[in-house]
Image (cartoon, helix red, strand yellow):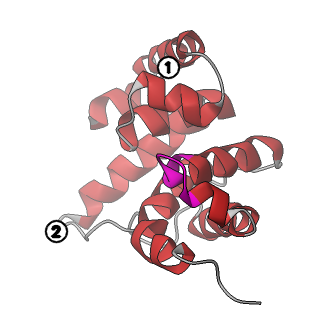
């Protein structure tokens, strides 16, 4: 079976960013890669139609998030690899580890929907409208989920000290 035209280029260009987002959702690099490959696998068969859309990446993110929200993902909170996928290594590994632990602990307090909204809005830098489109909900829902998430994160003392 041949690869759809442009699919390989898309995967090569965007998979690192997708894995980084998936890592923030799952908290585990292996689970993140599994999530991205599951989403890409679901997208591959529809690629001709997906590629004609304004933003094929938004479609893949939507598939990735719906997969994340429906699978029974477990946040393990342990990061045996000392870096976030797709990010350059920092010089102060101890400080980076402290920040990573604080972020992971804080994100674990959020519901999957809140975590998805925070990751899309603040880590992937999407607008409310783009986030709503990816999540398949209204902008008001994104605002509510984000507001509730930020309130929980604000109440998390280690997270607030790390930023």
From the viewer's perspective, is 57 left or right of 163? Answer: right
Q: Nearer the viewer, residue 128 or 73?
A: 128
Q: Residue furthest bottom?
A: 1
One can see residue 77 in this view: no
Horizontal and vertical percent position of residue 42: 75, 63
Q: Residue at x 54, y 13 (%)?
A: 148
Q: Which mark is residue 36?
A: none
Q: Is residue 55 magenta?
A: yes
From the viewer's perspective, is 143 left or right of 95? Answer: right
- Residue range of the region highlighted in magenta in the rendering: 51-58
Q: Residue at x 51, y 73 (%)?
A: 11
Q: Which mark is residue 146?
A: 1
Is 60 above or below relative to 48?
Answer: above
One can see residue 60 in this view: yes
From the viewer's perspective, is 60 left or right of 17? Answer: right
Mark 1, residues whose alpha carbon is within 10 Å: few (<14), some, or many (≥20)?
Answer: many
Horizontal and vertical percent position of residue 152: 51, 18
Q: Which mark is residue 91?
A: 2
Horizontal and vertical percent position of residue 146: 49, 19
């Amino acid at each position: 079976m041949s690869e759809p035209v442009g699919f390989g280029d898309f995967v090569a260009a965007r998979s690192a960013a997708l894995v980084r987002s998936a890592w923030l959702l799952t908290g585990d690099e292996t689970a993140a890669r599994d999530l991205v490959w599951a989403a890409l696998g679901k997208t591959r068969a529809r690629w001709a139609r997906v590629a004609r859309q304004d933003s094929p990446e938004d479609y893949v993110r939507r598939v990735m998030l719906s997969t994340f929200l429906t699978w029974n993902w477990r946040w393990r909170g342990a990061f045996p690899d000392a870096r976030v996928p797709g990010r350059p290594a920092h010089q102060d590994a101890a400080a980076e580890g402290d920040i990573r632990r604080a972020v992971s602990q804080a994100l674990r307090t959020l519901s999957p929907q809140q975590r998805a909204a925070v990751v899309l809005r603040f880590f992937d830098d999407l607008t409310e409208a783009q986030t709503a489109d990816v999540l398949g909900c209204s902008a008001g829902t994104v605002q509510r989920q984000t507001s509730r998430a930020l309130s929980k994160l604000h109440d998390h003392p280690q997270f607030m000290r790390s930023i």
